[in-house]
Amino acid sequence: MKRNYTLVLVLFLLFYSNPLFSQILDPVSWEFGYNKTGEMQYELVFTATIENSWHLYSQDIPDGGPIPTSFSINESDNFELVGNVEEISEPEEKYDSSFDMNLKLFSDKAVFIQKVKLISDEPVTISGSVEFMSCDDQRCLPPKDKEFEFVLEPNDVSQPKTTIDSSESQSSGNMSSLLGFFFLSILAGFAGILTPCVFPMIPMTVAFFSRGNISRGKSLAQAIIFGLSIIIIYTSIGLIVSLTSAGADFAGNISTHWIPNSIFFLLFIAFAASFFGMFELILPNKLLNKADKQADKGGLIAAFFMGLTTVLVSFSCTGPIVGALLVEAAGGEVIEPALGMFGFSLAFALPFTLFAIFPSWINSLPKSGGWLNSVKVVLGFIVLAFSLKFVSTIDQGYHLGIMSRDIYIAIWIVIFSLMGLYLLGKIKFAHDSDVPFLSVPRLVLVLATFTFVVYLIPGLFGAQLKPVSGLLPPKEAQKFDILSTALQTSLPPVTLGTNETNILCENPKYADFLHLPYGLTGYFDYRQGLACAKTLNKPVFLDFKGHACSNCKEVEAKVWSDPDVLKRLKENFVIIALYIDDRTKLPEDEWITSDYDGKIKKTIGKKNADFQISRFKINSQPYYVILDHKENVLVSPMAYNLNIKEYNDFLDAGLKKFEEGK
């Protein structure tokens, strides 16, 4: 008996009609390099890369106009400037109605050059800053300053050298994360096809495009329009979510608040129950009938409505998968919802389109049967396992202590053990067929499932479980952890004078509910940690992280656990871990009024998030910064990076720069 369970969908859409995502606009990035042009002669090269639809203003701007691009170079007796900064790129000239004047501006890329002549025979450092302003057709950003530094060797005969804006490392980490999410979305799209309300539709779709006496060319056009329609419809859902934004740290606040996480948890439980056959998520028949009538009219427009009908009819199986993808994107980049829906729809539409173009392939498809419901039930187990993430997020954000890492892993062990028993035919659900024998594909899945269960078991005792570390509670949430104790004792004791190098100046604030992994000690308040770094004469290792940050947990599990990295962190730095999503309320005398958005920040997380945005112009995690005692950034900050060698190089470079500045 089918029932109309649209309430879950309505709750989901109502929640996502609110703004969830945002980013700090930073459409111009800079590269600073130099070329040696002769004996003691150099060209300093300033290259601005400008995002699409944005522009950067020329140095030559009339009075009363926007802020021009300008370069300030600190004077020194070791070099002299030859002329002024030259604009190598040719600016375009456009009328700007906002300023009522013609303005010179650059799009895509702008290159500037300053010629210099060295006077000293010793290495010469040239530093300064560039002030610039960027606008698009609808808005302008406040003027920004970007500092630069060149170290020129008079006897240098090497190739031209370039230093990159520190935001590039963040972009690289974000790109890696986005690609991973994109491929996950593609896999979800293929999984959506192998469900009982979608797979049988493939032959019906082929029959639709094969009916009548239409030409091969027209049939091909209809099939392509049909596939593109599915992609456009799903991607539009993601775009709607992507284009709703409300402040740089809003997504972080939403991702850890108990209300949305409770809603997400209940949604995932409902999705799992639907996959198990407890009920079906069905859209109103009136909507389905209207789309179906339009599809019967024929022509290219009919191909679009056939795509819409396919999306609507398949909703009872794809709805939970689509919902899970959008929920998973809630804590990510502003582009993730649209990218996720594009990846999902691309994989989902591909088989339909190919079989519509090549109908003879339909004979090679396996016949529909009970195996389709088995796919649906397996997805139900996976969705059920993922639902725990939202309970864990609430637990970590509010320090409830009810979902430790070992309990979380224990529940996963039970869920995937039940899934293995289901695949063996020992458990049956409402719409399942009998399993008279174990097929080879099913046997492979059984082996994979129980292998995963066995792999999880050491996690109960503190094992890293690195491949899935981003999905689990953080290591410091482990109640029973014998392996970390062994790891700490395996490190050689290191002393500084008569004190342990990992010693702290005073008890850290918030240490009763915030912790660092692997026995590391540090601070959770910036000012307290900075004061201790000055006392111990060590550089500051600033760690912007979050309870709900999967990438943060993954870096700690796969990089920080390395003995060489851990040794460096223990010996050489004062660690300050700043949680940007902790919801603990601060005493009123510690509240701050943000310079960024003018709002009062009353919790640990909001205060730390505002500090990251205001100080470093970035709002994603993890983000690692090494500072000296004057709060100067010593080396380019590092974002998400799982390369242990590069991480060690980052730590070593920061320590070396600190030692040189003593």
Image: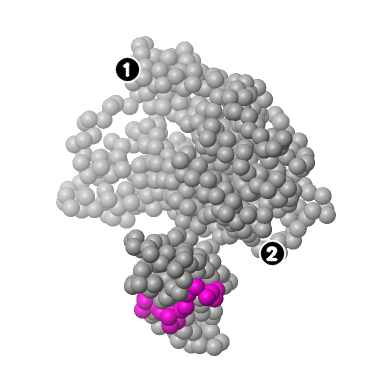
Disc 1 secondary structure class: helix
Q: Within 10 Å of the Cα at label 2, are there few (<14), some (14-19), or many (20+) other Cα atoms?
A: few
Q: Mark 2 points at which residue?
A: 595
For image coordinates 62% across by 58% down, the residue present is: 632
Q: Position of residue 306 (x, y in %)?
A: 34, 47
Residue situated in front as seen by the camera: 173 or 637: 637
Examine the rendered structure and indicate whether residue 92 appears above or below residue 620. below
Q: What is the span of residues highlighted in magenta in the rendered image?
A: 72-90
Q: Which amino acid does label 2 sit on?
A: Asp
Would you say residue 198 is visible in this rendering?
no
- Local crowd size for mark 1, using a 10 Å CA cut-off: few (<14), some (14–19), many (≥20): few
Name the residue: 50% across, 66% down: 125
Instruction: List the single residue furthest toward the front.
Output: 121
Name the residue tied to disc 1.
440
Question: Which amino acid, by three-letter code, is at mark 1?
Answer: Val
Circles 1 and 2 in contact, beta carbons < 8 Å: no
Q: Is residue 289 left or right of residue 62?
A: left
Q: How many marks?
A: 2
Q: Is residue 408 covered in magenta?
A: no
Q: Does the magenta stretch include residue 84?
A: yes
Q: Please identify the quarter of the rendering in which residue 345 is found.
A: top left
State the image coordinates of residue 320 (x, y, percent, origin top left). 50, 37
Residue 291 placed where, x, y %? 40, 49
